[in-house]
Image (cartoon, rainbow, N blue to C red):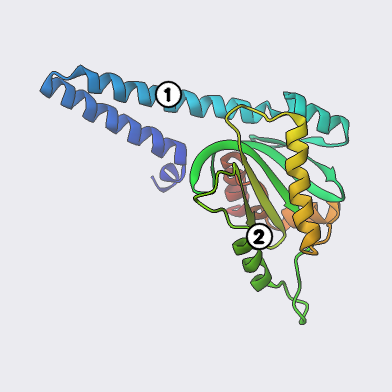
Amino acid sequence: MHKFFKNIFLIIYLILAVLLVIAIYISIKKSSYELLIIVTGGIIWAVLDTLSGKRRHSNIFRTKAIKKLIRNGFVIEKINKYTGVIGIYKGYIFQIYFDWDTYVGYKANSGIVFNVFYNPPLTDHNEIDTGKIDELHKKYKFNKWSTLRYSYRFRKYNVLMKNASAIYMMPYFQLEKRMDMVVDILVKENLNTITLREVQKLLERNLDYGPEVSYYKNYSKKRNNQ
């Protein structure tokens, strides 16, 4: 049963099923079928939205913006059920993928996520400067009152930029503009580039620095448990 409850989607569907049963009971009890229609409609929408999001994740490389990245040297990356693209932009390694169930700041959204790698800042003792990482995270922290539709999260070797997207994929000029924003921050903060081979070695050691989308995280957990 423990493995069953580790699957977040099964948990969600279980909760939705319970809510549906409760709605049916209340509706019958009070002869209020409006509640049943509202709850049932919400459940159907949630299920279809999740299924649609998974499909969009798997087909990201078919969008015009990503096709242009591929023409510019990016390659399709498939790991288990995870699908995205990886490549070099202005010296930095970018992993780009669609996440149907992420957070941009404090709000749940679907969106395009950049996972960008860099050489971590070091202390005078040649150790990773976690204090500097914390400072960067606070400096570029998402303001819950902001109207911005993107947010950053810094980690030891990489930064995640999450871009909320009401539509499936933003046009290429907007995608490139957001990529430039990340690069500008990394250059400004003296976070130097890392080679593709170094990224591959990093992910071989620890997949936790990879994408945060559930398809990739589930694969990471399976490999770590082997």
Residue 11 makes an appearance in the image: yes
Say what amino acid the circle numbered 1 marks.
Answer: Trp
Dot label at residue 45: 1
Answer left or right for 39 relative to 90: left
The quarter of the picture where the N terminus appears is top left
Residue 33 occupies quadrant: top left
Q: Which of marks 1 and 2 is nearer the N terminus?
A: 1
x, y percent for residue 93 = 80, 49
Dot label at residue 155: 2
Mark 1 Cα-neighbour bin, 10 Å: few <14, some 14–19, many ≥20? few
At x 30%, y 25%, the residue is 39
Mark 2 Cα-neighbour bin, 10 Å: few <14, some 14–19, many ≥20? some
At x 32%, y 30%, the residue is 17
Residue 118 makes an appearance in the image: no
x, y percent for residue 132 = 68, 70
Q: 203 or 49, which lies in front? A: 49
